[in-house]
Amino acid sequence: MERQPIMDLGIENTLTSAVEAWARFTQWLSEYAPVHADALNPPATEEQIEQAESRMGVSLPLELRQILMINNGTTARNRTLSGNSFYDARGGGDYSPFPSYNVFNDVELTCSLYTGNRTASVSMQEPGSRYEYWKQGWIPAFTTKEGHSGLFLDCSAGADPAPVYAYGEDSFPDLAFSSLAEYLSAVGNALEGIRPFTVMGRGAPHLPSVRDGLLAW
């Protein structure tokens, strides 16, 4: 199936907020990948977010909070192929609608991953060393199903918006996008055929395809 634009491809959209970029993404899913649109969770509540922030000991970045209060992550957590058929994103063998197999984490998973990583970081840190495996304020917003790689928002220095870093199990984090809005805009541009998805111009460019109402990168 060909990628379908929801806006004029002759004009690249300059999106000024994560909310606008998210609306663009979910509108595209609703029109061209409805199964993945159905896999988006209902909004997170203020209470859920406040409880998570209390456990984490840090506030979520504003952009992420705004998106979670629209859709609290997605049930599409894995990318699984069975022969040539895609599993239903709402079922057990599902996969993520984001590039690089990254899952959009709900509040509870974000909190669990963050607290687990911080605990591991503290236990691993050698006396006198400034190296930290996982710094306070690194919020894992998107992860692979194994949880060992993905994208985190760095609010450790109080930047607003928080920059987005790509991380892996065996590599140091790299700056990927200046903000969550920029990341979502890059995804939207690829969906609409404006520009292939890349991380800071590095790596192979990605353009998605759709099959049976599911988006694949």
Image (cartoon, grey):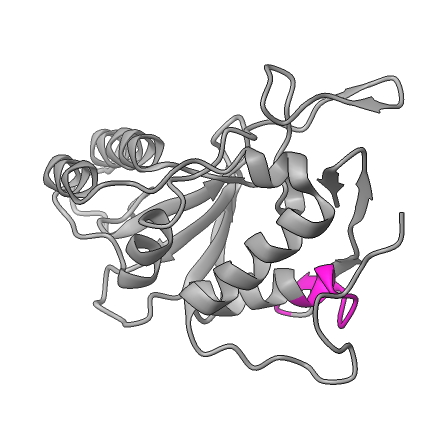
Q: Residue furthest front?
A: 31
Q: Give above or below for 178 relative to 170.
A: below
The magenta span reads 189-200
Give the side of residue 194 with respect to residue 101, left or right.
Answer: right
Residue located at (44% from left, 60% from top): 164
Q: Is residue 135 visible?
A: yes
Q: Is residue 195 magenta?
A: yes
Q: Position of residue 69 (x, y in %)?
A: 31, 49
- When asked about the image quadrant of residue 161, the answer is bottom left
**Res 133 quadrant in image:** top left
- Residue 205: x %, y % from top left: 78, 60
In this picture, residue 10 sits left or right of residue 149 = right
Image vertical order of residue 160 relative to residue 190, above or below: below
Residue visible at 75% across and 41% down in the picture:
216
Q: Is residue 18 magenta?
A: no
Q: Residue at x 21, y 68 (%)?
A: 158
**Is residue 175 in view?**
no
Residue in the picture at 57% in, 68% down: 185
